[in-house]
Image (spheres, grey):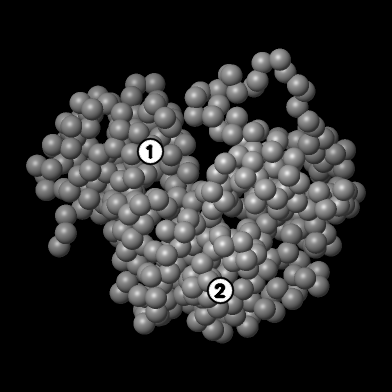
Amino acid sequence: MSKPHILIIDDEPDIRDLISDILADEGYSVSTAENGDTARQQLGQQKPDLVLLDIWMPDIDGISLLKSWRDAGTLQFPVVMMSGHGTIETAIEATKIGAKDFVEKPISLAKLLQTIEQTLTQHNNDNQVAVATNWHVFEPIGSSDSTRQLRQQLDRIIQTTSNVLLVGDSGTGKLNVAKYLHQSRNDQTQAAVITDALSWPEDALQNTLNSLWQNIQGQSGLKSIIIANVDCLTPQQQSTLAASIKAWQSQQLAIIATAEQDLKWLLTQGDFQRELYDLIGEVSLALPSLSERAEDVPELINFYVNFLPDNEQTPYRKMSFAGQNFLRNYAWPGNIRELKNLVRQLQLLGNEGDIGVNEVESLLATVDQPKQSQSTPEWYGLDLREAREAFERDYLLHHLNQVEGKVGELAKVVGLERTHLYRKLRALGINAKSLSKAADKA
């Protein structure tokens, strides 16, 4: 039986070395990282059985790193936070995000070893399969023609074992549909893993894919690997993924991939490989934007009005018909995700009683109001990493507007290879397609 592998992420070399030596003496396999970038490299090379994560680091704090793993669906290992004096409340907050436990600095080695052993035992008991048991999965909601057609198409796909490609704008519910497909094809005990291609390493991708495969090997029934953002893969990553999928073809495995960009169009631009497209796109399904199914908005609002109090303990506040009608005519650039966030915001921070149309209008006016120009850029008040991201986002949005949302033209202007540019835009939350649509309407 292989040794449990523990990754220590801490910017203090003395602490890293001390914990590493102790754990090695206890029979664990150990690797270390001094910051977020090194941690990503280590995770790309070998999946740990447990991560010891410091809260404060120079390039990214441990809470943000934990959130990034959770939001990307790559938190497939237990995390124990390490917190100094004055950060215990933060460490406790981290357990709500996904951390399993925390230890306080200065670290008691006896307490640390006990926490590691208990966490590994609990994780092994809870994760005999890689599928999450707490998924909130539901079929597409709504009575519009496009939503009814989508449900009918999914009903037919569920009867097959085909690889499926889900294409749609950001926030249209691609990940929910992917989970729905997997669970509808199986029962709750069947294995699935979720991974975000944006988090994949440039090099050593084969190790990451091998780890994904190992997570679901040995399970009965149709296994699934859900891969988000396949349209952001570099050419090298595309080749590696295609080779792995071909190697898995003799197994009971379904690939469910998601993309924002139309892969057929990327094929014509030379930015996506035909072989990989044919492998993952045995069935391709387009998800409509919320603006294309405006009649579904009241039904979605009422769903989240009830869903959020039940699952997130937000205060229950139903929305008036006037508020629902107002939102039917809203553009919804963030699609279903934006609608869900809007309902959550109104329930948590609004007044008591029903949500009225004035409250909805006021919140949207605050969200959409353009920021006043400032003599000093706002990112001067941020740390270096956040300032860099703010500048890059502003810079790319400026040039993307200049080229009317055309990513190919943007790549020429900013001097980036197009596939890398797609990854950068996605990481910064920039939806080039929405800008292109706006330019077409102008």
Checking the image for residue 335, the label placed there is none
Question: Could you say which quadrant of the image residue 210 lies in?
Answer: bottom left
Report if residue 401 is visible in the image: yes
Q: Amino acid at mark 1?
A: Asp
Q: Position of residue 120 (x, y in %)?
A: 26, 51
* Residue at which label 2 appears: 281
Q: How many marks?
A: 2
- Residue 88 seen anywhere in this rendered image of the structure: no
Q: In the rendered image, which quarter is residue 241 located in?
A: bottom left
Q: Position of residue 284 (x, y in %)?
A: 61, 73
Q: Is residue 254 above or below residue 380?
A: below
Name which residue lies at 72% across and 48% down: 405
Please give left or right for residue 195 compared with residue 326 in the image: left
Q: Residues within 10 Å of mark 2 (few under 14, many from 20)?
A: some
Circle 1 SS class: helix
403 or 54: nearer the viewer? 403
Q: Earlier in the sequence, mark 2 or mark 1?
A: 1
Q: Nearer the viewer, residue 9 or 111?
A: 9
- Does 249 sit above or below residue 62? below
Q: Residue at x 81, y 69 (%)?
A: 144
For numbered disc 2, what is the local secondary structure? loop
Measured as percent of width and height from the top left, residue 169 is found at 67, 57
- Are there few (<14), some (14-19), or many (20+) residues within 10 Å of tag 1? few
Q: Which residue is mark 1?
A: 37
